[in-house]
Image (cartoon, rainbow, N blue to C red):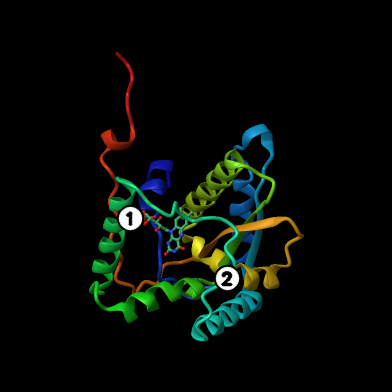
Amino acid sequence: MDVYEAVASRRAVRRFSGQPIPRQQLERVLSAAARSPSGANLQPWHIYALTGRPLAGLKKRTAERVAAGDTGDEREYQMYPPELKSPYRERRAAAAEQRYTALGIPREDRRSREAAVAANWDCFGAPAALFCYIDRDMGPAQWADLGMYLQTVMLLLRAEGMHSCPQMAWSVYCRSVAEAVLPPPGLILFCGVSIGFEDPTACQEEFIDRAPLAETVTFVDG
Ligand SMILES: Cc1cc2nc3c(=O)[nH]c(=O)nc-3n(C[C@H](O)[C@H](O)[C@H](O)COP(=O)(O)O)c2cc1C
């Protein structure tokens, strides 16, 4: 698979088959992803790869918290600006609309929407997940490094025939994740990344649209 194909076929997959992922395959991806660039080569990512019982235990404990009406832990970082301005607000609304339409969930069906959100904490059925931490001392440039690293991982997963879904949703229950992975003090959980093979029986969600090139790229070439 060439890089264009990997980029074009990557999307946030939210229905995985339970097919386990051999440890070797995951190690191959994560070893290759270590080549990702980072300012001054800090490599500021701290990744915990969970499979099997530890992941099942975390899913179960989090599902119990959700079912008990627990709305989560004190947030360690702000996911989005409180007042999302244009054009970001419209893009977020359009993506949500596109996704729920593909799932056949009408706007007013709150229960189904909540269930779709809660599926985050089951990793959408994925048999593996990464939990991605960064040192509390790090600034925006290192958070960008972490983002580049994660995109590298997600593209390499495509080369292995696998899919992924990055999930800030896991930061909502960061204490449960910490109980499962026992990170050293001073790390913040940025996100989880669910990993696996797409459920072949899933009706494929559509590819989410992107803004036209001219909205996000300006060529300054005279
Ligand atoms: C940092 C990051 C966090 C995300 N968090 C979530 C999440 O918590 N739950 C979820 O279902 N999707 C999450 N997504 C997926 C985005 O919704 C998705 O990437 C976006 O809508 C574009 O769709 P596509 O990736 O399928 O092209 C996240 C994506 C990124 C990059």
Label 2 crowding class (10 Å Cα cut-off): few <14, some 14-19, many 20+? Answer: many
Q: Name the quadrant containing residue 17.
A: bottom left
Please state which of residues 204 and 136 is positioned toward the viewer in this rendering: 136
187 to 63, vertically: above or below: above
Question: Which numbered marker is on residue 92?
Answer: 1
Image position of 30 (left or right of 99): right
Q: Which residue appears farthest toward the top when viewing the image?
A: 222
Q: Nearer the viewer, residue 101 or 10?
A: 101
Q: Is mark 1 within 8 Å of ligand 1?
A: no
CB of mark 2 near ligand 1 (< 8 Å): no
In-image side of 62 versus 104 (left or right): right
The alpha-carbon separation of the residues under discs 2 and 1 comes to 23 Å
Q: Amino acid at mark 1?
A: Arg
Tell me if residue 162 can be seen. Answer: no
User: In which quadrant is the C terminus drawn?
Assistant: top left
Ligand 1 image position (quadrant) = bottom left
The residue type indicated by label 2 comes to Tyr
| Residue neighbourhood size for the residue with mark 1, other residues' Cα within 10 Å, grouped as few (<14), some (14–19), many (≥20) | few
- Say what secondary structure mark 2 lies in: helix
Q: Nearer the viewer, residue 204 or 19?
A: 204
Circle 2 sits on which residue?
Answer: 173
The x, y position of residue 122, in whole percent, is 50, 76
* Residue at 67 percent of width and 43 percent of height: 43
- Please provide percent x and percent y for residue 75: 57, 63
Residue 217 pos. (x, y %): 33, 32
SS label for mark 1: helix
Image x and y of residue 58, in percent: 61, 76
Q: Is residue 26 left or right of residue 88?
A: right
Total label count? 2
| N-term mark: 2 or 1 | 1
